[in-house]
Structure formats: C-alpha cells, structure tokens
Image (spheres, grey):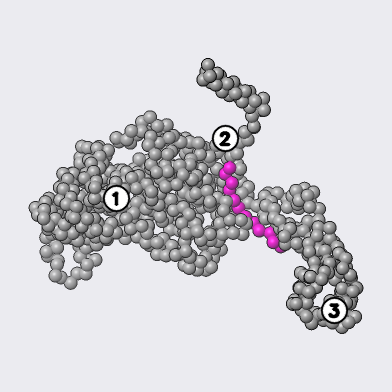
C-alpha cells in the first residue's frame, strides 16, 4: 500500500503535464477537481450497476429531482451517486470526443457533486485542455491512479491526508493570494491543540457529540485539522464540522474534502456551505460547541455594511452585535462577533457545555480604536463578560501573503475556575525555525516535531508542544503573563483648560466687523471711544463694560453679532484672564487634552499627581468620561536593553580605524 506522500507525489507528477498551457499556480484548477472526480469514480464503482438499475426503474416517473437523488444515493450507499453510463475507463474509448463525454459524466452526478464542479468552474478547464490537446493524456494518467476506498488501498483517512497535502502544495504555489483562504499547517495544528487541550473530560463523556464551525473556512484546512486531532486523541468521540465560505474555488475544495472523507454530519444538509456568512448565514439560529477561523486581514465590509449596521442597531445588550462595529476598512472583528453570537449556553443539566473559539487576527484588533470606538467597545463587551481567555503572539513572516505579526485569540464562555477573571498573554514571537525555502512572505515556521508519513520533519523541534505547554500551565514567567481583566481597561478623562483672550480694536478689525454688521456702526464707535485701542487682557471686564454701554444706549445685539464681535476683536493669549462661563470657566477647545487612566487607578489621585503639576489651571470634565480596552503586547513583554558604554564604542571605532590604516599601508607599500 502506497504511503500518503507517495500517492501525493504520484498525483503531483501528473500536474507537470499541464506545464505550458498552465502556469504552476494554476495547476490546482485542474488537479483538485480531477482528484475529486477520480476518487468519486472509485468510491462508486462497486454500487454503480445498482444505481444504474434503480435509475432505469425510476426515470420518467413522478419523482422530483431531490427525491430521485435521495433514492439513488441510497442505492449507492453514499451521500452522492452517478447515474451516467460512463466512468473513467469508458472515457478512454473515444479520444476525439472525450471533452463532451467528460462533461456528460460530470452531469450524471447527484446535485451536490454537480454544484461542487460548477463552483470549480471546471467546464472552462475542460475546454482549455481540449484546445491544448492534453485532456486525453491527463485523464489517461488519472485512470492509472488507484483511489479505491478499500482498507488496503486508500481508506478515507488516508484520502483525506492526500487531499490536504495536495491543497497545501497547490496553495503554496499560488502564494500571492494563498493567505485569503489557506492557513499554514503548523498554525492550524497549534490552534486546534490550544482549542481542544482541556476537552478530555468533556469529549470522553459517553455518547458525546460536539459541533464545530468555521465561518471563513476557505479550503477547509482548519476543519480537517480538527478532525485529524480527534482521530489521534479522541477516536471514540464525535466532532461534526461545518464551514462556510464565499470564494467559489475554496468552497468547492472544502466541500469535496468533506464528501471524499464521508464526514459525519448532524442535523441534515451539507457540512460546508457556499455564501457570505454575514449576508447569507447558512447556519442561522444554530449554536456550536467549537469555533475556529482565520478571517482575511484588513478587508473592508462595505458590501455588508447595511445589513450589519441593521443587526447592530436591533441587537439586545446581551448580543455581541450590540457592542459596536469596527472600522469599515477592516472587518476581521466581525467574524468574532458572528462566532460569539452562536455560542452555546452553559447548562450541563441540558448537556450544554458552553463554547470555545480560536481565531487568528493581525495586531490591529488588539488596540485599534480609542475609548468609545467600535473596536474598543467590542473588546470591552468580550472582556467584561470574562470571555477572553488567552492571546498567543505568533512569529512574523508566518503567512504566505503577509509578513506582519499575527495573534491567536482564545475566547470562551466556559473558563476553568482558575482562569476566571484572568487573561493570559503568551509570547511565542521568537518560537520559530527558518524555512528551508521561502514561500511568498512565509520565511518562518513553528517546529512541529514528530514527522508525519513521508514528511521530512524529523529534525524539527516540537515548538508547538512548547507553546501549548506555556498556555496550559497557566503560570507567569518570561513568556507567559497573567492579568486581571481590568488590567486592560482604562477611563479616558477629558482635561480642560480655561480660554484666555486679549481684546484690542484696530482699524482693520473694525472695518471687517462693520462689513458684516453695518447696523452696529454707532455702537462700535462708542465702544472704540470708551475702551480705546490699547490691548485688554481681561475679556470678562471688557464685555461687562460693553454691556453697560449697550444698556445705556438701549441697543440690543443678536447672539450671532455678539459671537462675531468676540471672534473679530479677540485673540488667544496665555497671559489673559480665564473666561467665566456660568458658575465655572469656559474651556479652550485647542488646549483640550485626554488622559487614559487605568481602571484600577484612582482618577482624582492620578489627576492630582500627573496633571496638575504641569497645568495647574486644568480641570476634569467627568461627564465626558469613556471606558476603553486595549491590549498592548509590546508594553507587557518589553525588555529594556541598556545602551553600550561610550568607552566600548570608542574602543570599537579605534579598532576599525587601526584596521583601515593597516589596509592603506598594505596598498601603498
């Protein structure tokens, strides 16, 4: 029996026949659909005569397409069937018309498979291969690949591994866009290990069945990783996996993977659905036990804005959609809100054990948005409900289309007792090994330790296990910090300072004012005569004098005219007297400042010791207080490196100078 790696390499060699008409990043357009097609052909071979007989008996009857599909699926013994008289071997019988026969063969599948090939847009590739005169050769080579589901040939778990490896290889070739729908294998492994680390007691319960959702599943790598974990650690437990994606090829790949593995599904319908998770949620009203996702970084949500804003405005306070909305140019936090909205309640008596989620973010969701802003309010909603369990910082240059730092968030409504009220930060930014060969922006990886079948990774350290241990031990050390929830919160206070004005009437200002208010000529002349042209630093006294003059003359000014007068004839002057307003002072908007005071700190004490010594005339406007939350990883893991002593620097410079002089002497001698 061929190993996973040998079978993968055999199929990979067929892809080389596409060189010319296709560039390597385009190979997956042909190879993935044909692997699926060949596997289905082998899976259905034994029951094909029974299906054809049942189809002959049923065709022309009154059964609708869905009902007929169900009858034929039952005859095939699988969740799909093929009612065509053709198969891969018979396609070889007419080389000149193989393109039309292949199309006919695909159209003979049940609706769920036809839909997958529609999303693969495989009809375009059939025509392209026909024009390049390579279609027959490619199909012939696939006929030689035995993908029968027999235990001694290619059982479902092995087929899953082969398909996962092919997906990974093809996506690595297409690394310019791979990050949109493909997560590196070691990141998936780490996320799944963190997500399911402490689930032993739960998953070992008799008859337990858990459900997992990836709302941005791409090619299904994360769901496949979760299934692999379950096979290795909890073979007797059931984990039903579900996903949704709006990228057609990615969806088709994930849906094919699920069908080929004949993945268990619970509740009817297909495991993987096509569509926008925000505009067309295929799992609306459903709750899940686990969530995992790597949503795209920095992608705007203008297309979904109307629906999401409506959802936000109507959501009750207990719903994560009520918290706030991120900036429209980065919708990654929306996926976390979407996931939390589907969290299961915690009610063990009803066999409801809450939910856990692992999601990959860039650094932006950690701190973007000030107090009262959408991102801050989302963080606040999560943290104040004690749902943020941990954040793991990953090395840079880990993903195929971006070198930025990334972070795994672990969010749950069933924290362990010792974690309640706490948030753990794990710094794994230096836990990496260099790639033997760069793949796009990916130059680093986290060591996976134990090699898989045929994988040359035996010399790698098991860095994934190291990170998981850091998280699992829940101890404070150099790489793991423990904080109270409130440690990430702060109150943004508004610090005001008084407005100070200097009054002076000049010929130019006088003319400018009268151009706007000519009816006040007599009043302005009287004010000019009474106050003169000298500067006055007390606007309060100036305006009191003007009010007396106007009252004496019986003149009444409009509010707009009073504002215009102050605007034209005054300028700000720090030497002026503070302006009075009611029982207090009028604030200078240009001098307004803000202070972020930690939630655990006393605001009055902070103001007294940190603000008043620098601006003694300041005061706080507590009516404008706002609470915010941010997580600054660098601040908590920063290590001060003292500068080198001047003597050491001088010594190095002297050494360099001596070396330069020696080289010059060698040249001149």
Classed neighbour count for the residue bearing mark 3: other residues with Cα under 10 Å, few (<14), some (14–19), many (≥20): some
- Name the residue rendered at 22%, 67% in the picture: 65
- 2 or 1: tag closer to the N-terminus: 1
Q: Is residue 139 visible?
A: no
- Name the residue rendered at 67%, 54% in the picture: 491
Which residue carries the number 2 mark?
478
Classed neighbour count for the residue bearing mark 2: other residues with Cα under 10 Å, few (<14), some (14–19), many (≥20): few
Find residue 475 and report its horizontal and vertical position in percent.
56, 37
Which residue carries the number 1 mark?
26
Which structural element holds mark 2?
loop
Q: Please say if 510 is above or below 149.
A: below
Locate the N terminus and report the quarter of the image it occupies.
Answer: top left
Find residue 214 and report its horizontal and vertical position in percent.
40, 53
Q: How far is the residue under mark 2 from the one under mark 1?
A: 45 Å
Which structural element holds mark 1?
helix
- Name the residue rendered at 43%, 51% in the picture: 293
Q: Please say if 31 is above or below 513.
A: above
Q: Is residue 438 left or right of residue 594?
A: left
Which residue carries the number 3 mark?
523
**Magenta highlight range:** 623-634
Find residue 286 and report its horizontal and vertical position in percent.
41, 60
Q: Give the camera-side residue of 663 and 458.
A: 663
Q: How far is the residue under mark 3 from the one under mark 2?
A: 74 Å
Where on the picture, by quarter, is residue 201?
A: top left
- 3 or 2: tag closer to the N-terminus: 2
Asked if the residues shown at circle 1 and circle 3 are in contact, with their CB atoms under 8 angstroms apart, the answer is: no
Q: Please say if 230 is above or below 53.
A: above
Q: Is residue 468 visible?
A: yes
Whether residue 219 appears in magenta in the rendering, the answer is: no
């Amino acid at each position: 029996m061929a190993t996973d790696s040998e079978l993968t390499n055999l199929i990979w060699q067929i892809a080389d026949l596409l060189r010319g008409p296709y560039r390597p990043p385009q190979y997956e357009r042909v190879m993935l659909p044909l692997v699926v097609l060949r596997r289905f052909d082998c899976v259905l071979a034994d029951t094909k005569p029974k299906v054809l007989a049942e189809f002959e008996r049923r065709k022309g009857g009154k059964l609708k397409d869905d009902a007929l599909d169900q009858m034929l699926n039952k005859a095939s013994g699988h969740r799909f069937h093929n009612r065509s008289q053709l198969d891969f071997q018979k396609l070889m019988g007419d080389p000149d018309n193989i393109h039309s026969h292949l199309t006919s063969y695909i159209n003979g599948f049940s609706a769920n498979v036809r839909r997958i090939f529609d999303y693969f847009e495989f009809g375009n590739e059939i025509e392209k291969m026909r024009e390049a005169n390579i279609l027959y050769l490619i199909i012939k080579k696939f006929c030689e690949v035995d993908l029968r589901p027999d235990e001694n040939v290619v059982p479902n778990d092995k087929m899953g591994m082969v398909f996962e490896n092919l997906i990974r290889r093809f996506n690595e070739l297409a690394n310019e866009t791979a990050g949109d729908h493909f997560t590196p294998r070691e990141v998936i492994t780490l996320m799944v290990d963190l997500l399911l680390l402490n689930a032993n007691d739960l998953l070992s319960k008799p008859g337990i069945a858990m459900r997992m959702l990836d709302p941005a599943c791409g090619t299904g790598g994360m769901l496949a990783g979760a299934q692999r974990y379950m096979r290795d650690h909890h073979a007797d437990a059931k984990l039903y996996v579900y996903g949704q994606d709006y990228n057609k090829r990615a969806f088709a790949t994930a849906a094919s993977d699920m069908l080929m593995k004949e993945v268990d599904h619970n509740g009817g319908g297909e495991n993987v659905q096509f569509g926008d998770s925000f505009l067309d949620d295929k799992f609306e009203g459903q709750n899940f036990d686990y969530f995992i996702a790597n949503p795209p970084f920095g992608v705007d949500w203008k297309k979904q804005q109307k629906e999401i804003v409506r959802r936000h405005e109507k959501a009750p306070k207990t719903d994560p959609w009520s918290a706030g909305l991120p900036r429209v140019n980065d919708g990654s936090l929306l996926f976390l809100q979407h996931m939390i909205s589907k969290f299961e309640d915690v009610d063990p008596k009803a066999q409801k054990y809450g939910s856990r989620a692992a999601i990959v973010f860039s650094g932006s969701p950690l701190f973007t948005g000030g107090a009262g802003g959408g991102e801050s309010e989302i963080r606040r909603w999560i943290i104040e409900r004690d749902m943020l369990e941990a954040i793991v910082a990953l090395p840079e240059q880990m993903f195929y289309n971006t070198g930025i730092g990334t972070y795994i968030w672990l969010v749950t409504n069933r924290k362990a007792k010792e974690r309640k009220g706490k948030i753990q930060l794990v710094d794994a930014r230096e836990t990496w090994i260099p790639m033997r060969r760069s793949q796009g922006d990916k130059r680093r990886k986290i060591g996976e330790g134990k090699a898989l079948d045929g994988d040359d990774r035996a010399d790698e350290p098991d860095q994934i296990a190291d990170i998981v241990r850091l998280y699992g031990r829940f101890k404070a050390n150099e790489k793991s910090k423990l904080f109270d929830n409130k440690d990430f919160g702060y109150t943004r206070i508004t610090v005001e300072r008084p407005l100070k004005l200097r009054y002076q009437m000049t010929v130019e200002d006088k003319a400018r004012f009268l151009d706007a208010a000519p009816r006040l000529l007599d009043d302005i002349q009287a004010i000019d005569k009474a106050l003169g042209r000298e500067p006055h630093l007390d606007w309060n006294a100036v305006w009191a004098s003007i009010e007396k003059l106007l009252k004496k003359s019986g003149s009444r000014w409009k509010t707009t005219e009073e504002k215009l007068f102050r605007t034209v004839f005054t300028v700000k002057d720090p030497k002026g007297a503070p302006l009075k307003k009611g029982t207090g002072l009028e604030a200078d908007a240009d001098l307004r400042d803000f202070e972020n005071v930690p939630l655990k700190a006393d605001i009055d004490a902070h103001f007294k010791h940190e603000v008043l010594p620098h601006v003694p005339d300041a005061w706080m406007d507590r009516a404008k207080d706002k609470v915010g939350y941010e997580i600054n990883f660098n601040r908590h893991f920063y290590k001060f490196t003292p500068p080198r002593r001047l003597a050491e620097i001088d010594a190095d410079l002297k050494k360099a100078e001596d070396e330069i002089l020696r080289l010059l002497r060698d040249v001149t001698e």
